[in-house]
């Protein structure tokens, strides 16, 4: 479980992001965070992943305060995929995966890493592109590689900040299916913008606005009123087959 | 995700094949360096014959010339080039900026300021006329240059520290610091008398012939330790390419790598610049050629930059002695000329990484 208590944070002397945020994220579930731009979604993922540390309040992961964890311990517990990720155009897919798993002061990877990489290439269907440069593959494939770079690490928590950015609908569903498959054994938090993606895949949806959690609810219980309060838009929710809901804006 | 039937034996095949090719390049580069070294040692009015030397058929005077002039010059060219190439590669990898090099970070300008200060205000280094050029003697100038370059890099380091090592901050800080030191140097030259101004001017020309054994003894161990360190950190240097947020969660002790990089670069560049003057662009040129052969693999990028730096400076030094024979021109002029061509190539290739 990830527990957040009285979280306060602001960037420098500027805008205050969190005034006093408290909520908890359940284990072995896919939690999607949605909310308008600038409501603190990305900042929250950065705090949970240990990227930002100058906050006040407490964040604990599996009953351990993350302040007490070193950057190395943190990397073994939480695997984080940033919203904005750069890449060296010349590095290949397989080299990217090796880099993530490589140990300190080694020229070559060991048999354990080799097995992990083989498994990841199967799991994320990277056989076709494994020897291509990152600059040679499509946006959807690139995002799958980044998800694989996070997923290849054996962590208990996976945090994805807007993993569906700039993807077409097919790739969005593919990526969300992969992310969903993580949550059968591990805890996954994903920031998404498409409410329908959240409704289709999430086990729980967190509605955020102005640094506060407005609602934390199962997809089936999401109402038009909640979306109205979060985004200030009118919409209709219709029931779809297979016990799913669709939001029409 | 139904690909489980595909044989896993082949997963690493292309990777391993490419690695073999990269090792082949490595052997080729080392061979070229060796050839260049032998060729370079043989350049000069006195024709040394290697077999004669090896079979001990030269007398003491000839051996003295060989060791302290020919060998020192060629060996210095190699290690200075290796040091500049490695510095450039490390800076580019850590800062994720293909424009980073000791020269563009203002370290060389800091050294020039330190040297000029000692020459003009403390009367350090006395002038002696030698042929068509003016050379400087005395270690006070070297110490001044060393302090100047260390000061420059400390300023850049602290500016960067305040801005948590953002890739563009360091380059901008470097350019600013370089400009400040350059203007201060020019200010001093303006008020200095002609001879002293000329001395500071000549000092800035990078020239391998100013090299001394003591620099070789100090620089070699720094380089040997560093090249091993950075090659073994190659995989982690790859992760720098994915951006700060990814790096911070990756479990890599990136701060340690950054600090070690700064210590290495400042020591190496200060030592080199304080002894032989400013040799620009080798630190920019070598990593760019290295990147062409190593692709995304930073292990090979580091070792290639190291060897190619040595090779480039060795060739430049040969050119500087042969091009206008019997005149010898400072090697810094040669490297700058080729460096500018590479810089233009980078601009035209449109290096746009973000």
Image: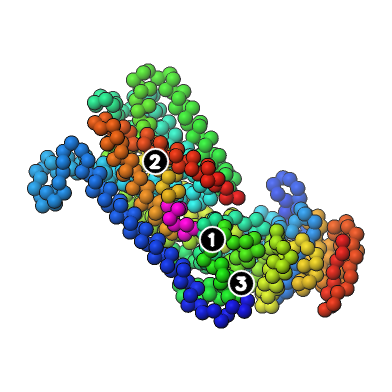
Alpha-carbon neighbours of circle 1 within 10 Å: few (<14), some, or many (≥20)? many
Q: Chain of mark 1?
A: A
Q: Quadrant of residue B268?
A: top left
The image shows residue A56, relative to residue A177, as above or below, that is above
Alpha-carbon neighbours of circle 2 within 10 Å: few (<14), some, or many (≥20)? many
Name the residue at 60% across, 65% down: A145
Residues marked 2 and 3, same chain? no
Residue at disc 1, secondary structure? loop
Name the residue at 72% across, 51% down: A10
Q: Which residues are magenta?
A: B290-298
Q: Which mark is residue A124?
A: 3
Reading the image, the residue beneath label 1 is A133
The number of callouts visible is 3
Reading the image, the residue beneath label 2 is B270
Q: Earlier in the sequence, mark 3 or mark 1?
A: 3
Instruction: Tell me if I can see residue B158 in this picture.
Output: no
Q: B335 left or right of B99?
A: left
Residue at disc 3, secondary structure? loop
Point out residue B261 in the picture as x, y percentages from the top left corner: 46, 50
Point out residue B249 in the picture as x, y percentages from the top left corner: 59, 61
């Amino acid at each position: 479980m990830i527990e957040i208590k009285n979280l306060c944070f602001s960037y420098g002397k500027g805008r205050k992001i969190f005034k006093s945020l408290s909520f908890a994220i359940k284990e072995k579930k896919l939690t999607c965070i949605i909310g308008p731009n600038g409501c603190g979604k990305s900042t929250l993922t950065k705090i949970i992943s240990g990227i930002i540390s100058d906050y006040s309040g407490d964040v604990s992961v599996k009953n351990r305060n993350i302040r007490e964890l070193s950057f190395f311990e943190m990397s073994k517990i939480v695997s984080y995929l940033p919203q904005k990720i750069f890449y060296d155009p010349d590095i290949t897919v397989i080299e990217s995966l090796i880099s993530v798993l490589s140990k300190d002061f080694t020229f070559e990877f060991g048999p354990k890493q080799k097995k992990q990489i083989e498994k990841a290439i199967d799991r994320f269907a990277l056989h076709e592109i494994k020897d291509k440069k990152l600059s040679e593959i499509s946006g959807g494939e690139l995002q799958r590689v980044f998800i694989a770079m996070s997923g290849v690490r054996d962590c208990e928590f996976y945090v994805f900040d807007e993993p569906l950015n700039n993807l077409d609908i097919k790739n969005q569903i593919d990526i969300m299916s992969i992310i969903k498959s993580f949550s059968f054994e591990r805890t996954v938090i994903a920031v998404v913008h498409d409410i329908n993606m959240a409704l289709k895949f999430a086990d729980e949806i967190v509605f955020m606005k102005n640094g506060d959690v407005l609602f934390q609810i199962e997809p089936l219980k999401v109402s038009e009123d909640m979306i109205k309060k979060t985004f200030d838009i009118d919409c209709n929710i219709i029931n779809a087959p297979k016990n799913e809901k669709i939001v029409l804006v | 995700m139904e690909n489980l039937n595909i044989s896993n034996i082949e997963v690493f095949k292309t990777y391993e094949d490419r690695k073999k090719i990269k090792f082949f390049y490595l052997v080729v580069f080392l061979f070229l360096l060796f050839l260049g070294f032998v060729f370079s040692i043989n350049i000069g009015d006195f024709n040394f014959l290697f077999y004669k030397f090896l079979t001990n058929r030269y007398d003491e005077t000839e051996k003295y010339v060989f060791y302290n002039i020919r060998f020192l010059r060629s060996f210095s060219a190699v290690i200075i080039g290796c040091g500049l190439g490695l510095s450039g590669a490390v800076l580019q990898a850590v800062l994720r900026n293909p424009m980073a090099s000791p020269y563009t970070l203002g370290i060389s300008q800091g050294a020039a300021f330190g040297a000029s200060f000692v020459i003009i205000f403390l009367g350090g280094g006395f002038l002696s006329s030698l042929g068509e050029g003016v050379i400087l003697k005395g270690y006070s100038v070297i110490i001044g240059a060393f302090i100047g370059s260390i000061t420059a890099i400390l300023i850049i380091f602290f500016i960067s520290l305040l801005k948590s090592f953002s890739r563009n901050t360091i380059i901008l800080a470097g350019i600013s610091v370089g400009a400040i030191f350059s203007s201060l140097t020019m200010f001093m030259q303006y008020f200095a008398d002609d001879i002293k101004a000329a001395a500071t001017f000549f000092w800035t020309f990078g020239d391998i012939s100013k090299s001394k054994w003591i620099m070789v003894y100090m620089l070699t161990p720094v380089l040997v330790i560093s090249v091993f360190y950075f090659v073994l950190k190659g995989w982690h240097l790859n992760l720098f390419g994915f951006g700060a947020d990814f790096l911070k969660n990756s479990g890599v002790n990136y701060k340690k790598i950054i600090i070690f990089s700064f210590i290495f670069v400042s020591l190496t560049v200060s030592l080199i610049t304080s002894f032989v003057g400013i040799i620009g662009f080798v630190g920019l040129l070598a990593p760019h050629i290295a990147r062409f052969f190593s692709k995304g693999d930073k292990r090979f990028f580091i070792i290639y930059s190291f060897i190619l730096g040595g090779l480039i400076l060795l060739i430049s030094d040969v050119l500087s002695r042969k091009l206008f024979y019997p005149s010898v021109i400072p090697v810094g002029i040669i490297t700058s000329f080729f460096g500018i061509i590479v810089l233009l190539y980078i601009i035209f290739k449109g290096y746009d990484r973000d």
